[in-house]
Amino acid sequence: MLALSGLYYAGYFFPNYQDSLIYNNSPYDFLRQMPADHPYWEEYRHRIIMCVGQGSWEDELLDSTRQMDALLKERDVPA
């Protein structure tokens, strides 16, 4: 996965609403609920690159990227 200036929480666009479509398209929520022993984690440890620019239009994205980075670090996924 190569992620460029992403927003990783779909709830940003749908506050106070959640269904399976939103959940499955919200990487932060989906990965947060994935069991620590799921075999995909090992795959992710070798396949994720995330970057975000520092332009003024990325201010809102930076927080989402940092939250995703923290989640991945909790699961020993270098990103």
Image (cartoon, helix red, strand yellow):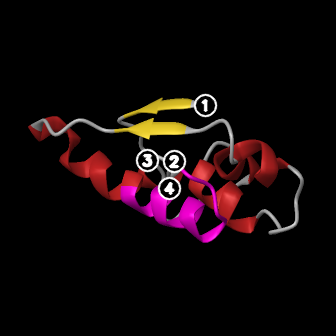
Residue corresponding to mark 3? 13
Q: Earlier in the sequence, mark 1 or mark 2?
A: 1
Going from the N terminus, do you reach mark 2 or mark 4 first? Answer: 4
Left or right: residue 62 versus residue 40 is left
Residue type at numbered disc 4: Gly
Disc 1 packing (10 Å; few <14; some 14–19; many ≥20): few
Mark 4 and mark 1 lie on one chain; the one further toward the N terminus is: 1
**Residue type pointed to by label 2:** Ala
Q: Could you say which quadrant of the image residue 52 lies in? A: top left
Q: What residue lies at 60% left-to-right and 31% top-to-bottom?
A: 1
Number of other residues with Cα within 10 Å of mark 4, as a class: few under 14, some 14 to 19, many 20 or more: some
> Residue beneath label 1, please?
1
Q: Is residue 75 left or right of residue 34?
A: left
Q: Which residues are magenta?
A: 66-79
* Residue 79 disc label: 2
- 42, 55: nearer the viewer: 42
Above/below status of 34 relative to 43 = below
Q: Nearer the viewer, mark 1 or mark 2?
A: 2
Helix, strand or loop at disc 1?
A: loop
- Tell me whether circle 4 and circle 3 mark residues in contact (CB < 8 Å): yes
Disc 2 packing (10 Å; few <14; some 14–19; many ≥20): some
Question: How far separated are the C-alphas under marks 2 and 4?
Answer: 22 Å
User: Considering the numbered disc 4 on the image, is that residue within a helix, a strand or a loop?
Assistant: helix
Q: Position of residue 49 (x, y in %)?
A: 51, 36
Disc number placed over residue 16 in the picture, else none: none
Viewer-proximal residue among 24 and 40: 40
Q: Is residue 41 magenta?
A: no
Image depth: mark 3 or mark 1 in front: 1
Find residue 43 and report its image quarter. Answer: top right
